[in-house]
């Protein structure tokens, strides 16, 4: 896989805007966002913006993922329920901070792709389900 300058993104787009928790910063740094976006958006993966992932859904911008994660005040023994798996990026970040992540996605094809991607990348403490309340 190609690489992007993650340190520049983290310094310029996340730390510069107030994210300080070292474990959150380490998790954002460790998860290759480019692996969670369509290939034609590889270079855009290092920008601080939401990107389309298909089915009228987006991957959240890195700052928002970092901010949401920091606000959760997660501990290693925690279990997290994520609603809206999308491409699996936030689930991957969360997986590095907690014991277990359960994520649910209403778009079946996104859930299937996220499950495969997370498995392929070694995020083994994430379970992705498909469903919606009616």
Image (cartoon, grey):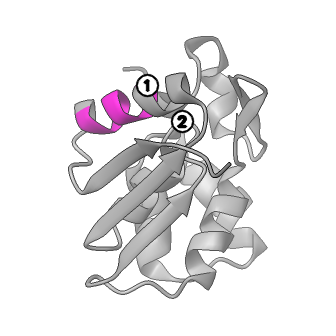
Image quadrant of residue 65?
Answer: bottom right
Q: Main secondary structure of the magenta part?
A: helix
Report helix, strand or loop for mark 1.
helix
Estimate the x, y position of residue 32 in percent, counting from the top left.
44, 40
Q: Is residue 30 left or right of residue 43?
A: left
> Which mark is first along the chain, 2 or 1?
2
Residue occupied by mark 2: 87
Point 53% across, 43% down: residue:
131
Q: Circles 1 and 2: CB distance less than 8 Å?
A: yes
Find out whether residue 118 is within the magenta segment: yes
Image quadrant of residue 55?
Answer: top right
Pick the residue in front: 73 or 110.
110
Report helix, strand or loop for mark 2.
loop
Where is 114 relative to 2, above or below? below
Where is 123 relative to 57, above or below? below
Point 75% across, 47% down: residue:
48
Estimate the x, y position of residue 106 in percent, counting from the top left.
60, 39
Distance of label 1 from label 2 (alpha carbons):
7 Å
Point 70% across, 60% down: residue:
63
Pick the residue in front: 46 or 101.
101
Residue 3 appearing in the image: no
Residue occupied by mark 1: 113
Mark 2 residue crowding within 10 angstroms, few (<14) / some (14–19) / many (20+): many
Point 35% across, 72% down: residue:
97
Where is 34 relative to 75, above or below? above
- Residue range corresponding to the magenta coloring: 113-119
């Amino acid at each position: 896989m190609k690489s992007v300058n993650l340190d520049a993104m983290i310094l310029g787009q996340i730390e510069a805007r107030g994210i300080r928790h070292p474990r959150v910063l380490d998790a954002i740094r460790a998860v290759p966002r480019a692996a969670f976006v369509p290939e034609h958006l590889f270079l855009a993966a290092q920008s601080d913006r939401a990107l389309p992932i298909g089915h009228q859904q987006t991957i959240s911008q890195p700052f928002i993922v970092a901010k949401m994660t920091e606000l959760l005040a997660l501990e290693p023994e925690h279990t997290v329920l994520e609603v809206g798996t999308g491409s699996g990026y936030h689930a991957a970040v969360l997986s590095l901070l907690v014991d277990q992540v359960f994520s649910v996605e209403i778009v079946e094809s996104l859930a299937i792709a996220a499950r495969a991607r997370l498995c392929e990348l070694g995020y083994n403490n994430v379970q992705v389900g498909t469903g919606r309340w009616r």
